[in-house]
Amino acid sequence: MTAPTTYELSSLQALEAESIHIFREVAAEFERPVLLFSGGKDSVVMLHVARKAFWPAPIPFPVMHVDTGHNFPEVLAFRDSTVQEMGLRLVVASVEESIAKGRVRERPDGVRNPLQTVTLLDAIQQGQFDAVFGGARRDEEKARAKERVFSFRDEFGQWDPKAQRPELWSLYNGRHHKGEHIRIFPLSNWTELDIWSYLKQEDAPLPSIYFAHEREVFQRDGMWLPVSEFTSPKESEEVVTLTVRYRTVGDIPITGAVESSAASYDEIIAEVAATRVTERGATRADDRLSEAAMEDRKKEGYF
Amino acid sequence: MAELLRFATAGSVDDGKSTLIGRLLYDTKSIFEDQLEAVERTSRDRGDEHVNLALLTDGLRAEREQGITIDVAYRYFATPKRTFIIADTPGHIQYTRNMVTGASTASLALVLIDARNGIVEQSRRHAFITSLLRVPHLVVCVNKMDLVDYDEAVFNRIKDEFRNFATKLDIGDLSFIPISALKGDNVVHRSENMPWYDGTSLLHHLEDVHIASDRNLIDVRFPVQYVIRPQSTEHHDYRGYAGTVAGGVMKPGDEVLVLESGLTTTIESIDTADGPVEEAYSPMSVTVRLKDDIDISRGDMICRPQNRPQATQDVDAMVCWLTSDPLHVRGMYGLKHTTRNVRAQVKDIEYRIDVNSLHRDETAETLSLNEIGRIKLRTTKPLFVDEYRRNRTTGSFLLIDEATGATVGAGMIL
């Protein structure tokens, strides 16, 4: 803790306190919250803060993974060991099942990221969840910069950016009717650098793919894609072995690796502090679709 | 240890606010290449003459299509000394509610004045909202100094006029900085074009302004948010009251009084997941354990026997109205104050204030969207309140439409 005489908090302490406040507010006012946990760094931080908010009691809600079926095996293993260690209940919402049931159809390009919305909304409805924690941050993307911490969704899971509730002081309004729900973003005010600095401060474990490792990759649309079960090079695409790491973790076919030798938190923090491209710009093909790609997906009910 | 400073900016495109924010972000290396490229591409497509940095913050499709800012946008940047959260709000009168929203969490407000035009109606409105929301620090940036030949007399004239107006308001700390956002004068570095100015650059001011004493460290206020009872073998008898400190400094061994029961007891321990702490103060989120087993639940307030908030069902408040369906006398609303949810009826509208002239209209019978007025409320259960001027957390509340669940009013207790 800080020196007791100054009564000041560090920036990370202030952000953590705000997030803890949000978790407790939701646990007190909602009946069936659920936390979206992918094994990605933001959801790892979210879970870490949630644990602190309720300590020494266990986290009073389950976690949900929206599983595209295109997972990095390292991330899936991390998900399962975390859930086991923390004694959490895991709900898996499977995009593959949604396809099998005919709720959505596989896209010609095989990318399943946009299909997740239907799977997510079905799982929210089925579980009758009224509060859904997401790890989105406002610094990630400009549609997200305008989203509330408590973000109202109608009975179809839709977000209406023009009809958002004003959010003042630390007073959060979670009122909703049956069938509607609220998306909760406890990390709204954190930046990418805050996330890494916090992971280091807390010495929290992450999936190994966030750290530099050797991998067979090939270049497509300016991104390094891995040679994997789900992504294979075309004839014209040359396979090379590079030292890479991931800045974000998502559906394999649209998540690019970055060339990097950063193998520790300190090295990653130095790299993030010096980087000149946003994490989504560097590594996410789904956000390059159009100026308003994220806004359009969010309106339909995306994360 | 890097501290966090939240500040609000208000203004329209014309006074150079977006250029100023763009420069702060750019010069602190907080804009990324792909963001800048996207903005350059869109500016080009729209046929803009210059790269329009407003596009960095105007994130919604409707905003880009109409070329306006319709909502509060949050931006982030950091220097080695502090990290900053900017609540960037549009300045037009129809967006008063957005400026109120942005100012509610800000420690500092930044108001821009075009050196060529001097103080205009909008500047007065921004200063009034800053004082109404009790933002402790106000920085007036007199912008576009390059267009008035960096003339000291122009700056001094605006400064004097603003000070004169500000005496009618309650503004704690008022500073003036002559800048050119476009040319970069006095934004990040001291300008050589204005040797007559002996103050600091804007960024330097943001890094150095003393915010630690803005919080209330005198009146202990701890609204109970959530009761933690693990009921596990290991922590069988654990019973902790979780919440965020809203005022004062709490220590183990302190005698405390719990509202609404009025019972007194002693703080046994102040817990966090990282271990117990010796002191807790705003805005720490902690869990308090008490010596005696008394019935406490969410919505209760822990304070000191000799220093307690007022327990009342009659509330006098300034209210900013946030929705198109107007506030009426006799109207019934949901009310959220700290961790307490009650219902409230409007008993009287004392006056509506003109946010530009500060004129009070005592004949007003309604408050419409973006209007501000003084009202009297009667609540179904007591609230534990302080004056907003004394504590921004225990002095503020929301009014909620009970049918739609929408947030319709923002209240500050008098």
Image (tube, grey):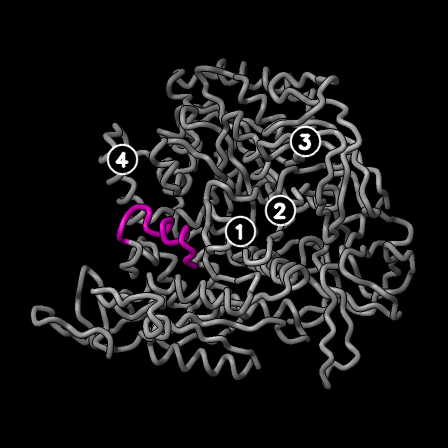
Tell me the amino acid under the disc marked 1.
Answer: Phe
Element type where label 3 sits in the image:
strand
Q: For the view shown, which residue lies furthest in the left direction? A: A236
Residue tagged by mark 4?
Answer: B43
Same chain, labels 4 and 1: no
Q: Left or right: where does residue B122 sit relative to residue B340? A: left
Residue name at image x 75 percent, y 18 percent: B362
Residue tagged by mark 2?
Answer: B405
Residue tagged by mark 3?
Answer: B327
- Circle 1 packing at 10 Å, graded few (<14), some (14-19), many (20+), is many
Distance from disc 4 to disc 3, alpha carbons, whole Å, reads 41 Å
Q: Chain of mark 1?
A: A
Tell me the amino acid under the disc marked 2.
Answer: Gly
Tell me the amino acid under the disc marked 3.
Answer: Leu
Q: Is residue A18 above or below residue B110?
A: below
Q: Is residue A14 above or below residue B179?
A: below
Give coordinates of residue B345: x percent, y percent. Answer: 77, 37
Give coordinates of residue A258: x percent, y percent. Answer: 27, 65
Whether A299 is among the magenta residues is yes
Mark toward the viewer: 4 or 1: 1
Q: Is residue A259 visible?
A: no
Q: Left or right: where does residue B6 sit relative to residue B70? A: right
Q: Which residues are magenta?
A: A288-303
Distance from disc 2 to disc 4, alpha carbons, whole Å, reads 39 Å
Foreground of the two, B340 or B302: B340
Distance from disc 1 to disc 2, alpha carbons, whole Å, reads 10 Å
Mark with earlier residue (2, 4): 4
Mark with earlier residue (3, 2): 3
